[in-house]
Image (cartoon, rainbow, N blue to C red):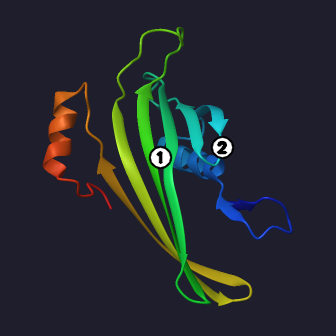
């Protein structure tokens, strides 16, 4: 789903909060999204409750960069790179010692939009996931080294 600034706006952006909630519901069940403390175009944070009742997890998505380019009068491309940090949620002590993240990834999404007519736009999208080096987890650091900067998921 997407949204604009207002009805007359030519600015349209993905509705990250809606889309993330729907993906989490599809993957983890209808009551998996417990809280969304931050939802801005450049930062999104949510607390998820796995269906098995295990520990809560916090997912932070931070925008690192965006770019767009007109390819022709009928076609344009845009890309966004985000850092996704998945951590155990701190239930009782938000001011406690930092907890190492369960995973940290950079995700690049490239979309190419083509205007078909005045009422239709077609989008072709590709997403690639890259590992980020860890300072605290030797196995995660080794996986990052082995990836050699290549995507690990497309």
Q: Considering only vertical position in the picture, is 108 above or below 145?
A: below
Q: Nearer the viewer, mark 2 or mark 1?
A: 2
Q: How many marks?
A: 2
Q: Residue at x 22, y 35 (%)?
A: 140
- Residue at the spot of label 1: 27
Classify the position of the C terminus by image quarter: bottom left
Residue 32 as seen in the image, left or right of residue 7: left
Q: Residue at x 86, y 65 (%)?
A: 7
Q: Considering only vertical position in the picture, is 38 above or below 94?
A: below
Mark 1: few, some, or many residues within 10 Å (few <14, many ≥20)?
few
Q: Secondary structure at mark 1?
A: helix
Q: Secondary structure at mark 2?
A: loop
Q: Residue 10's x, y, as percent?
A: 76, 71
Viewer can see residue 124? yes
Residue 101 as seen in the image, left or right of residue 33: left
- Residue at the spot of label 2: 40
Instruction: Give the quadrant of residue 68.
Output: bottom right
Q: Residue at x 26, y 33 (%)?
A: 134
Contact between labelled residues 1 and 2, with CB atoms less than 8 Å apart: no
Classify the position of the N terminus by image quarter: bottom right
Q: Earlier in the sequence, mark 2 or mark 1?
A: 1
User: Residue 50, labelled with which disc?
Assistant: none
What whole-number distance in Å separates the C-alpha atoms at marks 2 and 1? Answer: 23 Å
Q: Residue 138's x, y, as percent?
A: 17, 29
3 vs 83, nearest the viewer: 83
Q: Residue 42's x, y, as percent?
A: 59, 46
Q: Considering only vertical position in the picture, is 120 above or below 44?
A: below
């Amino acid at each position: 789903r997407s949204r604009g600034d207002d009805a007359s706006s030519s600015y349209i952006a993905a509705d990250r909060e809606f889309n993330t909630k729907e993906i989490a519901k599809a993957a983890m069940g209808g009551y998996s999204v417990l809280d969304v403390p931050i939802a801005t175009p450049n930062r999104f944070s949510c607390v998820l409750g796995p269906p098995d009742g295990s520990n809560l997890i916090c997912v932070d998505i931070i925008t690192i960069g965006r770019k767009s380019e007109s390819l022709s009068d009928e076609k344009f491309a845009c890309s966004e790179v985000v850092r996704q940090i998945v951590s155990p949620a701190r239930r009782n002590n938000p001011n406690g010692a930092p907890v190492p993240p369960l995973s940290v990834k950079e995700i690049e999404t490239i979309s190419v939009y083509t205007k078909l007519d005045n009422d239709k736009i077609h989008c072709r999208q590709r997403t690639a996931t890259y590992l980020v080096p860890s300072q605290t987890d030797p196995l995660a650091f080794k996986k990052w080294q082995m990836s050699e900067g290549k995507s690990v998921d497309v």
